[in-house]
Amino acid sequence: MSDTPPNIILHAADVHKNFGGLRALSDIDLQIEEGKTHAIIGPNGAGKSTLLNVIIGRIPPSSGAVIFDGTVLTGKAPYEINQLGISRVFQTPEIFPDLPVLQNVMAPAFARRDGAFRINMFRSVDSETEIREEAEDMLNDIGLHGRRGDHAGSLSRGDKRRLELAMCLIQRPRLLLLDEPTAGMSRHDTNSTIDLLRKIKLGGMTKVIIEHDMHVVFSLADRISVLAQGRIIASGLPQEIKEDPRVQEAYLGGSVE
Ligand SMILES: Nc1ncnc2c1ncn2[C@@H]1O[C@H](COP(=O)(O)OP(=O)(O)OP(=O)(O)O)[C@@H](O)[C@H]1O
């Protein structure tokens, strides 16, 4: 056993967010350990999406700051935050519906190589071949290789979500934020997405997952934080969270199993 303290890759420090008179986030102190999968759970309206949007720069906090690996993110534009190595999979997939599935995965790989605003698809034939192979491998991993020539817009909702996950993964982010990654998927597709996310975990990528499906949460999470009415009411190991009476209460007497 080593005594080295865990590296905190992301820290939301004393974050508050008000929408007019509504306190969407209060006193948030969230620390994410590098290489871990950290789930954020909580009832509807608890503030989970607002917290993710604050992290990726889509919503400015009313006060407090978000720090990523020593860099203060607060005040930076979403594209700058993305270029620091943070990617997010949205609840509503953001794909290029008129392009083939394979091109959808290749585009962010070119952006990674060239910088997000200097995409030049024809710069180098060799590297285009490499990127095509990488995108094909990614589609294999995600189970969409058979659809690589189809327009992305023709995919089912669950497959669009998996495509968007592939588009994020090919950027090789250091931190991947997933907003309900299995919403709209069949149980079979949910389980293959869990398997894929487990595989990425072995690769050392840090992940933050917002999820309602407790099967997904307890299959993947190393740590869980529970939000209720804009506050973190509990944070700990999955077993601790399962047994925490405050968490049971936040779910209106329901079980978090
Ligand atoms: N842009 C906005 N303007 C005003 N109020 C907002 C805005 N975004 C969110 N809210 C409010 O902030 C609170 C937290 O919402 P948020 O979407 O973050 O919750 P959530 O935990 O993600 O919910 P769900 O699980 O239903 O997606 C809610 O009361 C919501 O109505």
Image: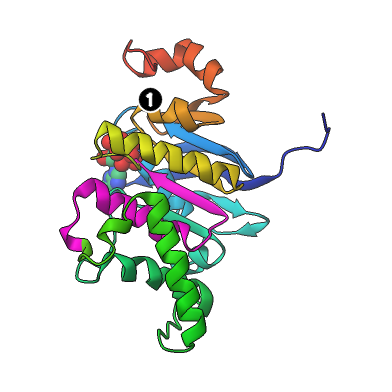
Task: Determine crowd level at label 1: few under 14, some 14-19, many 20+ residues with C-alpha closer than 10 A.
Answer: few
Residue at figure coordinates x 51%, y 31% from the top left? 221
Disc 1 designates what residue?
A: 214
Residue at figure coordinates x 41%, y 34% from the top left? 230
Kind of residue indicated by mark 1: Met
The residue positioned farthest toward the left in the image shown:
154
Callout count: 1
Q: Quadrant of residue 98?
A: bottom left
Q: Quadrant of residue 49?
A: top left
Residue at figure coordinates x 40%, y 13% from the top left? 248
SS assignment at label 1: helix
The quadrant in which the C terminus is found is: top left
User: In the rendered image of this protein, does residue 181 appear above or below residue 109?
Assistant: above
* Nearest the eye: 3 or 195: 195
Left or right of 61? Residue 8 is: right
Q: Position of residue 77 (x, y in %)?
A: 46, 67
Left or right of 69? Residue 223 is: left
* Nearest the eye: 242 or 73: 242
Residue at figure coordinates x 38%, y 50% from the top left? 142
User: In the rendered image of this protein, does residue 255 appear above or below residue 34?
Assistant: above
Ligand 1 - quadrant of the structure image:
top left
Q: Quadrant of residue 111?
A: bottom left
Which residues lie in the magenta part? 153-180
Check residue 223 for magenta coloring. Answer: no
Can residue 144 be spotted in the picture? yes
Q: Position of residue 235 (x, y in %)?
A: 55, 26
* Nearest the eye: 232 or 27: 232
